[in-house]
Image (cartoon, rainbow, N blue to C red):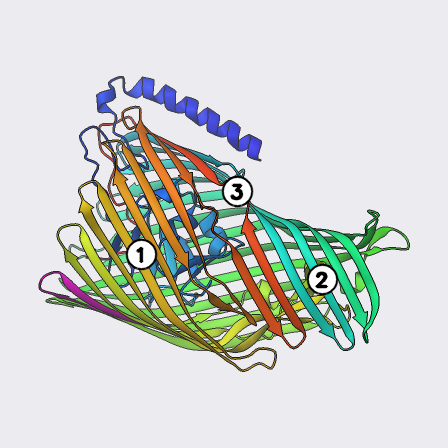
Amino acid sequence: MKRTFIIILALIVSAFASAAQETSTDTSQVSIFSVVEVLDEAVTTAEKSRVVYRLDRQKVSGNANLSASGGTAVDVLRSIPSVQVNSEGELSYRGSTGFLVYVDGRQSVLEGTQALQQISAANIEDIEIITTPSARYKTEGDVGIINIVTRKLDQSGFSASLNASGSTIGSWNGDALMNLRKGSSRWYLGLTGTQQKGRSDFRQDRKAIVDDYVTKSLSDGERFSCNSSYIARLGYELNLNSHRILFEAQTGVTEVARGGDLKYDEYRTLAGATINDALYDSKDRYSNEKRLAQLSADYDWKINERGDNLSFRSRFRYDWYALEYTESNMFDESGARYEGTRGYEDEAHWDIDVALAYDLHYRPSGKAEFGYQLTSYSEFGDYSIKYWNREVKDFQWQDHLAAPFWYRRQLHSLYAMATDKFGPLSVEAGLRGEMTDDRMHFEHTYTSRDIRRWNLFPSAHLSYEAPGRNIISAGYSYRVARPGIWELEPYITYEDYYTKKTGNPDIRPEYIHSAEIGYRKHFGGENVFSVTGFWRQRTDVRERIRTAYRPEPGVTLDSLVNAGNDRTLGIEASATVKPLSWWRLAVNGSVYHYRFISTFAGSSDASIISSGFSMMNNFNLGRTTRMQFDANYVGPRVISQGREKGYIYFDLAVRQALMKNRLAASLVFHDMFRTAKYYSSRISPTLVSETFVRPKYPHIVLSLTYTFNSSGNKEKSGAVSSGAMFEGKDF
């Protein structure tokens, strides 16, 4: 697949050259759009504002963070207050990984951090962070929605862009986009390929106690990961006077893979007597490969001059092949296989999204919106496992553990909301009702889940603009975090030889109250100061509790439970100033208090005061050269049964525009002083463990961006989201 993708990219490069010769021989007529803020000779080097605030969200510029060049959406978000990325590359916001990911107003074909890792930073215009979503949006995600607004090639005639990047650890991104606009119609074709690799030194020291068995193990070695995707999309858009139609088709392959090659030193006693003291080599592997296709269709009808609008959104996705594979192997000092497992989960799933909305403009500044949404997700599959048999020296199927299953979730949603403006006061309020229908059956365990529930979810937002560009805002939303199918699966899978995991079909959803209040002040042109206080309360928090696995002394089991309730109270502050005409400084900081109240016997109460800090220095070194130096501090946080320590790291990036700004080259040095380290500890009555992870170095990224436009029209600045789902006034 990678080879095919590279060949296609090469063909597209040839098409660029051919199109350039046929459509424009005068280079002065070429309009440039690239990751450099310089679009053509007539445009200055003025940078786009890094953060723009709206009534219910903040909008982060995709090209303001130079150190994200050659990276992904995860790298763009790293400098945002309260954003953390752990040793596995998983992103959390305000201490939670529970967020929805949208791309141009549509739910992503992937989920969570994986979705963000597959979106090249070079293709991002803006990222919208909606922490208290209105009634218009789905209620999933305890910290809201992250919407990626991609760059658009929307000029008349033919236009195209090509991006490529690679790093010293083997990560790379490549994408190509071609656009053809004639009059009211537009065709576009996009190809995206990405491979994000990670390599880390890993060390874990743990002690497990089961009755009279005491097992001490020390593991040391290397862990690695590789997340890749190859996506193609074809779209057609027709814009008439009062009608807009959009069709898009996507298909591709995604894979998440990780593993480790470790050495284990195991010492086991029974009632104080030594029963094992040996060295082992461990090789564990995990992969999740999907082949997917998605069709979507949008329709908008502007009914009258007043602005009343009827909109229809639809999406159908089908994953005709999905294989989740786990492998764990232990070898003794002679090289002979001592233990081994191989697990297979074959799946097929599809989901459907349909939304119908009507906007009624009852007065020039006021709008009411009414809508219905249907979400349906279905999955069927089969889990099977092999165990290594030492006597026959072969892997054997465990027929008694085979687990065919099927699962379906449907959500029916009705909502109503209104927005209005009364002088300097902007108001938005809404109510959303959702009926959840969950059905699941596991054949092996005869486990079933059949749940129907109806919930109401209110939301409200206020904004007041006082004289002197002083803005005060407030927001509230009530949300839910429903468990995914992977959290409900009752069978046991292997993380490595010493670590097993299991889901819980009886797990309950989390319910979340979120509120925030903010103040923003604009002064001296481009200078801005912002401070936000936030509060979040969750009930029935889902946590993985790690305990000793009794059937196998020395092995631990991660079980999913509703562990308790928690509260988070914090404050975020940011300031952007220009001390000099060529120097822009952005400083962000956050402090929050987290308290967990346990309601489960295997967990305990916990609290922590954590903080984060980032400083981003942007320097314009001439008309076509930029440099950025970042300093970042990530504070400690509480995890299940333990804590993670904080750390600090520094990045340096340089960007150069070439070929009269048609080509942009960026070079990024990540963690240039090698200070990023990840340390965590877990303590329970049956388990004590300490884990240390340090990324491999060096990590240097080179990225190139080239854009061609056959017309003389400049690229639209500030691309907007698809449809009317994401809209609002900047302030």
Query: Helix or strand or loop: what does disc 2 sit on?
Result: strand
Amino acid type at image mark 3: Tyr
Q: In x, y percent, where is residue 327? A: 71, 52
- For disc 2, the marked residue is 217
Q: Residue at x 38, y 65 (%)?
A: 611
Query: Helix or strand or loop: what does disc 3 sit on?
Result: loop
Q: In x, y percent, where is residue 671? A: 45, 46
Please give the label number shown on residue 697: 3
Magenta stretch in the rendered image: 463-476
Q: In x, y percent, where is residue 730? A: 21, 55
- For disc 1, the marked residue is 311
Q: In x, y percent, where is residue 544? A: 58, 69
Q: Residue at x 25, y 49 (%)?
A: 585
Bin the neighbour count of mark 2 within 10 Å (Cα to Cα): few under 14, some 14-19, many 20 and up: many
> Mark 1 or mark 3, which has the lower sequence index?
1
Amino acid type at image mark 2: Ser
For residue 153, above or below residue 282: above
Q: Residue at x 33, y 35 (%)?
A: 655
Q: Nearer the viewer, residue 184 or 421?
A: 421
Bin the neighbour count of mark 3 within 10 Å (Cα to Cα): few under 14, some 14-19, many 20 and up: some
Whether residue 699 appears in magenta in the rendering, the answer is no
